[in-house]
Image (tube, helix red, strand yellow):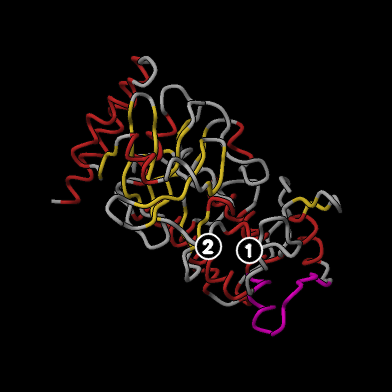
Amino acid sequence: ASVLGTLILVGEIIALCCWLRRKKPKKFEQVEAFLELHEKRATKRYKYSDVKKMTKFFKDKLGEGGYGSVFKGQLPNGGEMVAVKILTETRGNGDDFINELASISRTFHINLVTYLGYCVDRGRRALIYEFMPKGSLEKYIYYKVSVGAQSRLGLMTLYNIAIGIADALQYLHGGCPTRILHLDIKPSNILLDNEFIPKISDFGLAKLCAENRSTVSLEGARGTPGYMAPELQSGGVSRKADVYSYGKMLLEMAGGRKIFDVETEIYYPPWIYDRLVSNMDLELYGITTPEEEQTARKMILVGLWCVQTDPTVRPQMSEVVQMLKGSLQTLQIPSRPASI
């Protein structure tokens, strides 16, 4: 019964999106129309006054992005600690809010952030999630520690984090009731709990993809420069766009370097590729055991397969999981991607 209900919800969401695209409703009408459909199945809806109270009037700011600011809060009556995302009005019809609510509210996976509630009150919009005490992965993967960053995590911890993220993307692409393309995978969108279990967050750019379709159409490019798949510029994308972004992030995790280092002007993917094929020192700082070196090389090879220019050459996320868990000796060096 629950599966049938979820499938009905997915169908209704897709039908609503088609109707809204034809009608082009006024500002905020799109959000309210979605909520009329969604509210009876959704988690708790809060008033804006509740949001102000749970964040102590937005006292503790955790971060800020293109779609709003995130504050630390606590659910009423001494409830659990939460992260409250206050969405900006940069997309007037509420597309970002609908994308995130529709995508995350019916997903269940240990490596996806848990959604606890929302607020729509006179145009103000907020999403409420479980609080991740360790913050984002971005703070823990680079050797050059910037302001606000922490020491780089050990290679094997990063390897386990990489597998967790890959598992979650595999679930989004084929394990949940409708396929979901995240379209903004990057270190700052991966949150960590106290045990460094990774959770994919920020579904503001996500797209639902019907099971009988291999691609979705986009109005304009979306994503973050440096992690964005090249085909996003053309408008038609598949789940392989997430594979590309994951590959860029995986290379950073393995090498401890940013994709582009402003100081040295080194673009990391071609730099590490050329060293790999030439059997040169990969300069994997902090590697202390043969197991860590083998694991880092495996992560680099998988990352290079993921960032192939041609989406059809990139592995599926299910294959990425198998490659990461398998033996280094089974992996071949891919062609040098034109996009890097």
Which residue corresponds to the image point at 49% horizontal and 57% vertical from the top-left? 317
> Looking at numbered disc 1 in the image, what kind of residue is underneath it?
Tyr
Q: State which quadrant residue 171 falls in.
A: bottom left
Mark 1 vs mark 2: in front: 2
- Is disc 2 placed on a helix, strand or loop? loop
Query: In the displayed structure, would residue 96 be above or below residue 25?
Result: below
Q: Tell me if residue 317 is in the magenta stretch.
A: no
Tell me: 50 left or right of 200.
left
Q: CA distance from mark 1 to mark 2?
A: 10 Å
Q: Residue furthest right?
A: 264
Tell me: 246 left or right of 103.
right
- Residue 25 can be seen in this image: yes
Which residue corresponds to the image point at 29% horizontal and 48% vertical from the top-left? 106
Q: Tell me if residue 289 is in the magenta stretch.
A: yes
Q: Which residues are magenta?
A: 281-298
* Between discs 1 and 2, the one toward the N terminus: 2
> Looking at numbered disc 2 in the image, what kind of residue is underneath it?
Lys
Which disc, if any, is residue 134?
Answer: 2
Q: Position of residue 107 (x, y in %)?
A: 33, 51
Tell me: 76 left or right of 91.
left
The residue singled out by tag 1 in the image is 140
Which disc, if any, is residue 284?
Answer: none
Which residue corresponds to the image point at 58% horizontal and 51% vertical from the top-left? 188
| Residue closer to the observer: 276 or 313 | 276
**Residue density around tag 1, few if under 14, some if 14–19, many if 20 or more, within 10 Å:** many
Say if mark 1 contacts mark 2, CB within 8 Å: yes
- Is disc 1 placed on a helix, strand or loop? helix
Query: In the displayed structure, would residue 228 be above or below residue 132?
Result: above
Q: Residue furthest left?
A: 1
Q: Position of residue 322 (x, y in %)?
A: 49, 68
